[in-house]
Amino acid sequence: MHSVAPPPRAPDRIIVFDTTLRDGEQAPGFSMSVAAKLTMATALRDLGVDVIEAGFAAASPGDAEAVRRVAGEVEGPVFCSLSRANEADIRTAYGALQSTPKRRLHIFLSTSPIHRAAKLKMSRGEVLDAAVRAVSFARTLFDDVEFSAEDAIRTEREFLCDVMEAVAEAGATTLNIPDTVGYSTPAEIGALFTEVRGRIMPRFPDAVLSAHCHDDLGMAVANTLSAVASGARQVEVAVNGIGERAGNCALEEVVMALRTRRDLYGVDTGVDTTKLLATSRLLSALTRSPVARNKAIVGGNAFAHEAGIHQHGMIADARTYEIMRPEDVGFAGTHLVLGKHSGRAAIAQRADALGYPLNGNELAQVFAGFKRRADEIGEIDDRELIAIIVGSTSTAGGARAAIS
Ligand code: KIV
Ligand code: ZN
């Protein structure tokens, strides 16, 4: 079956390449069964990612089977397998992806001095030749071939540009510049993308530059955004930021950063952001890995407010303390948590919503009782609040009588 060449792309459209099922899944604690991968791939398709890296077919028969089933049973995005730069791996990946016309091969080969010496025991010339050979062979089976220069960030700039130019010449359609060890900074990676773009794009205007950033220094999202600002048109990401060591660039964070700061970046993705929370929770359930409460975009506190001053502002106008609408990422709404830091405005609003309009002295009494109880137990839920109101107000009537 013939494969399909990558479609033409608008210059302001970012390709979202999801590696949750490969780089994410290969990290300790995140391995998934074939069934779990199928469930996750369906959710990623519904989320609207463009490319799903379903695994590394040559890594094990199980991985090959997962790539084959995911690519064969889930329709929509381009499906991809990772591959080392050798014919055997490329053929195994082809075998796993054969049944899907929208297939991509993702070849990686290290280019940095430390990887060349310690891991590959290859000279620069040997690395360059092996990369070109692998891409040329891959193009006999795939129209869509991505090449990754592993540890690109720690590679000599001139040599990295030479490799990128040579693989583009050999037919690579996407050129990925990974920060494999999460070492770069936004300024550095921005300058690198500018330089590679200057070298490559005049000769290969259809080539797509791609960023793949790890989070070892906590800068994966910032570095990915800087790469986009400097010309990257594909971002490699994983849901909840899972991936090797500290993880990959978090899909939900980079997508919402591009959307929220469209004024700065001027680009769009095809992601349906209202599905971000459900997708994050699905992965969390499949891998039994809870998401931190304070995680950006999808954490439990992302749209929750307890401090009195913040709650007061939120009641007046949500834009005082929220830069995104909770509904836009899949939350039902803002959550005003009642606790010892809350102020009168939030307590009065919640009481009113529960059928207890409070004013003046009544509110003062409830507020004092509320603070005492919050000091004892922390968060005050609706039942607790009602109990406080009933206990603090001497003239409980109307709706109050109905609550026991
Ligand atoms: O981090 C990395 O360099 C990778 C490559 C295989 C793209 O995951
Ligand atoms: Zn990686």
Image: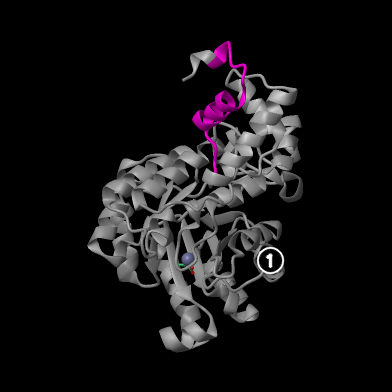
Whole-percent x and y of residue 104? 42, 55
Q: Is residue 209 above or below residue 374?
A: below
Circle count:
1
Quarter occupied by residue 141: bottom left
- Residue at figure coordinates x 62%, y 27% from the top left: 350
Q: Is residue 371 left or right of residue 58?
A: right
- Is residue 394 a member of the stretch shown in magenta? yes
- Residue at figure coordinates x 52%, y 32% from the top left: 384
Q: Is residue 194 left or right of residue 27?
A: right
Q: Give the class, few, some or many, for how many residues have Cα within 10 Å of label 1's Cα (few <14, many ≥20).
A: some
Q: Which residue is mark 1?
A: 186
* Closer-to-camera residue (134/318): 318
* Closer-to-camera residue (213/316): 316
Whole-percent x and y of residue 130? 44, 77
Q: Is residue 404 left or right of residue 141?
A: right
Q: Is residue 97 visible?
A: yes
Asked which secondary structure carries label 1, the reply is helix
Whole-percent x and y of residue 217? 59, 70
Residue at the extreme left of the image, as rendered: 61
Q: Is residue 298 visible?
A: no
The residue carrying mark 1 has its beta carbon less than 8 Å from ligand 1: no
Whole-percent x and y of residue 186? 68, 66
* Three-letter residue code for mark 1: Pro
Q: Which residues are magenta?
A: 378-400
* Closer-to-camera residue (345/142): 345
* Closer-to-camera residue (290/173): 290
Q: Is residue 163 above or below residue 400?
A: below
